[in-house]
Image (cartoon, rainbow, N blue to C red):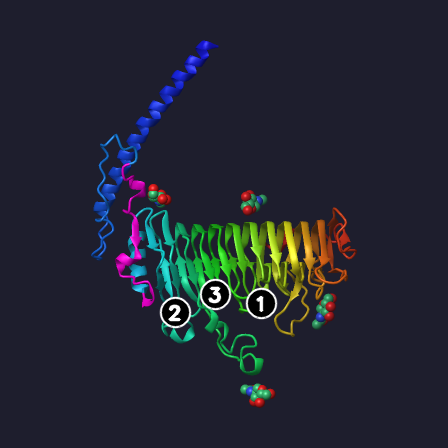
């Protein structure tokens, strides 16, 4: 016994010693790397060069265990003020942001810093890569676009404002706010019912999406407050590997087309710990998305979490493996919705909605394969196949203006493998238990659903469909 203890103690001492030695070595090594980098990166034109102003670091002082650790030095921080940003809320800081981006992009783990207590204004900008790995855009202050369509530069796209393009391994974070100044865009007479006497004027009506990630991979977006977007708050297209955490997204309930987070043609996405309130879909998932995990998200007021619309203009759409867990949806026009156009092809499969709390929501659970924005959609024989949809532990209250459960599946391509377990929805006001609606919907109820859903057909349809037959 005694000897084993001694042996262990000796072993521990050796381990500690070795660790200490390797720590020191790692620091020397790191310092050398920093120094090399400093000499190869051309210093920016700014007089307040952040590279040269960093404190000098002496590695040979053993008494101080953490002498200006190079990991935490200012070497890699590119403060937009050092590139001429004013941050008074009215000056145009675009050039400064572009220059800081360019400098940070060129070094590993570069940080573009927009510090707190400043309000930066920039025009539509494409922050493009490729950049060195681990680039960080750190927004601690306020960042905003020009104030509405009248001051939007004529040469700039009206479809997007901040664009991140061709990046890999990049983080957009900070405790700051992106203020979209959306009101003048929402008030354009071409927006629904904003024209004279509540009409809707015709004509082009482009309004910029606030933040767009395009053709990029391994992205982290966290901590930010994003508000009052002219149109979509955040959009991911053609991306792979997206981690969204602790975002606060908000726009008024009646702001048109202000989707919270929209993803399309994007794979491997996590959306966690976020609050979204807006005037359109809270989270919308378009074609070409798979392996999406959404958890601990609160939506509302909003239009809920939406898959689609899919299959417009006879297109093929594929969406698979989407999980939504531990979400709250309140004061929303829709809860969990899948919408497809008639005439499309493809498949929506393996969706799971679990532990969702509804508060005064219209159309809590909804599959609509007759989605149509005009009155003239003809019935078609082809449709996007919907299969393998699980609703588990969905509880709360619904707005009695619409039935809480609505499965309107295609005439020719039934929805299959719908699983309902512990779904209990009660009217928010009044006693009316509105009857669920189903058309051509097949599946199983593991427990008794409230309100009772007799219209869901048990089992499988006669002619069983194969996912593979739909080209996904
Ligand atoms: C740098 O050090 C400061 C003070 O020790 C700390 O508060 C901050 O979080 C560190 N930053 C990074 C990026 O590690
Ligand atoms: C709006 O409605 C008022 C009252 O009905 C009418 O006098 C006015 O001409 C209408 N304006 C337009 C632009 O249609
Ligand atoms: C489904 O997506 C999750 C990520 O959300 C992933 O971990 C898992 O492997 C995927 N499942 C399949 C069968 O691809
Ligand atoms: C299309 O089919 C649906 C379901 O069978 C039916 O309710 C609807 O009336 C049809 N619409 C047209 C335009 O034929």
Q: Residue at x 48, y 65 (%)?
A: 228
Task: Find out whether residue 85 is within the magenta segment.
Answer: yes
CA gap, disc 2 and disc 1: 35 Å
Q: Is residue 221 shown left or right of residue 346?
A: left
Cβ atoms at labels 2 and 3 below 8 Å apart = no
Percent position (x, y) of residue 327? 60, 51
Q: Quadrant of residue 79?
A: bottom left
Cβ atoms at labels 2 and 1 below 8 Å apart = no
- Mark 3 and mark 1 lie on one chain; the one further toward the N terminus is 3
**Residue beneath label 1, please?**
313
Q: Does the rendering let one see residue 462?
A: no
Q: Does the rendering let one see residue 14?
A: yes
Closest to the observer, 322 or 197: 197
Cβ atoms at labels 3 and 1 below 8 Å apart = no
CA gap, disc 2 and disc 3: 13 Å
Q: Is residue 146 shown left or right of residue 80?
A: right
Q: Residue at x 29, y 48 (%)?
A: 76
Mark 2 or 1, closer to the camera = 2
* Ligand 2 image-quadrant field: bottom right
Percent position (x, y) of residue 63? 26, 30
Closest to the observer, 445 or 198: 198
Segment colored magenta: 67-92
- Mark 2 and mark 3 lie on one chain; the one further toward the N terminus is 2
Does label 1 point to a residue whose CB lies under 8 Å from ligand 4?
no
CA gap, disc 3 and disc 1: 31 Å
Callout 2: SS: loop
Closest to the observer, 90 or 96: 90
Task: Find out whether residue 394 is within the magenta segment.
Answer: no
**Residue beneath label 3, please?**
228
The numbered dot on residue 146 is 2
Q: Residues within 10 Å of mark 1 (few under 14, many from 20)?
A: few
The numbered dot on residue 262 is none
């Amino acid at each position: 016994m005694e000897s084993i203890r001694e042996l262990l103690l000796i072993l521990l001492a050796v381990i500690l010693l070795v660790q200490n030695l390797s720590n020191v070595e790692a620091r020397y090594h790191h310092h050398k790397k920093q120094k090399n980098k400093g000499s190869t990166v051309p210093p920016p034109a700014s007089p307040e060069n952040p590279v040269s102003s960093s404190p000098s670091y002496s590695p040979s002082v053993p008494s101080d265990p953490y002498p200006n650790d190079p990991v935490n030095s200012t070497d890699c921080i590119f403060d937009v003020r050092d590139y001429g940003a004013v941050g008074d809320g009215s000056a145009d800081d675009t050039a400064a942001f572009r220059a800081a981006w360019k400098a940070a992009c060129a070094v590993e783990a570069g940080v573009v810093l927009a510090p707190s207590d400043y309000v930066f204004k920039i025009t539509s900008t494409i922050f493009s890569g490729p950049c060195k790995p681990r680039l960080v855009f750190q927004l601690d202050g306020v960042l905003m676009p020009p104030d509405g369509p009248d001051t939007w530069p004529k040469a700039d796209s009206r479809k997007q404002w901040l664009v991140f393009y061709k990046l890999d391994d990049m983080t957009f974070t900070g405790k700051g706010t992106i203020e979209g100044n959306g009101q003048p865009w929402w008030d354009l007479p071409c927006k629904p019912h904003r024209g004279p006497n509540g009409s809707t004027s015709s004509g082009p009506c482009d309004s910029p999406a606030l933040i767009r990630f395009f053709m990029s991979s391994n992205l982290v977006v966290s901590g930010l407050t994003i508000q009052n977007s002219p149109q979509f708050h955040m959009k991911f297209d053609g991306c792979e590997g997206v981690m969204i955490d602790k975002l606060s997204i908000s726009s008024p309930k009646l702001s048109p087309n202000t989707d919270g987070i929209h993803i399309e043609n994007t794979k491997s996405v996590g959306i966690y710990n976020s609050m979204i309130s807006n005037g359109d879909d809270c989270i919308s998932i378009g074609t070409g998305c798979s392996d999406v995990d959404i958890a601990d998200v609160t939506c509302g007021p909003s239009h809920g979490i939406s898959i689609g619309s899919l299959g417009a203009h006879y297109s093929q759409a594929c969406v698979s493996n989407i999980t939504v867990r531990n979400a709250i949806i309140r004061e929303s026009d829709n809860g969990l919705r899948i919408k497809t156009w008639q005439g499309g092809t493809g498949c929506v499969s393996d969706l799971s909605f679990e532990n969702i709390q509804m508060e005064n929501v219209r159309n809590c659970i909804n599959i609509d394969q007759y989605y149509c924005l005009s009155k003239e959609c003809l019935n078609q024989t082809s449709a996007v196949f919907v299969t393998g949809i699980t609703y588990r532990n969905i509880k709360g209250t619904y707005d009695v203006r619409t039935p809480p459960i609505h499965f309107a599946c295609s005439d020719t391509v039934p929805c299959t493998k719908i699983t309902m377990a512990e779904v209990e929805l009660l009217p928010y006001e009044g006693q009316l238990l509105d009857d669920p609606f189903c058309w051509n919907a097949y599946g199983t109820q593991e427990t008794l659903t409230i309100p009772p859903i007799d219209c869901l057909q048990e089992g499988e349809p006669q002619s069983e469909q194969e996912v593979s037959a739909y080209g996904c």
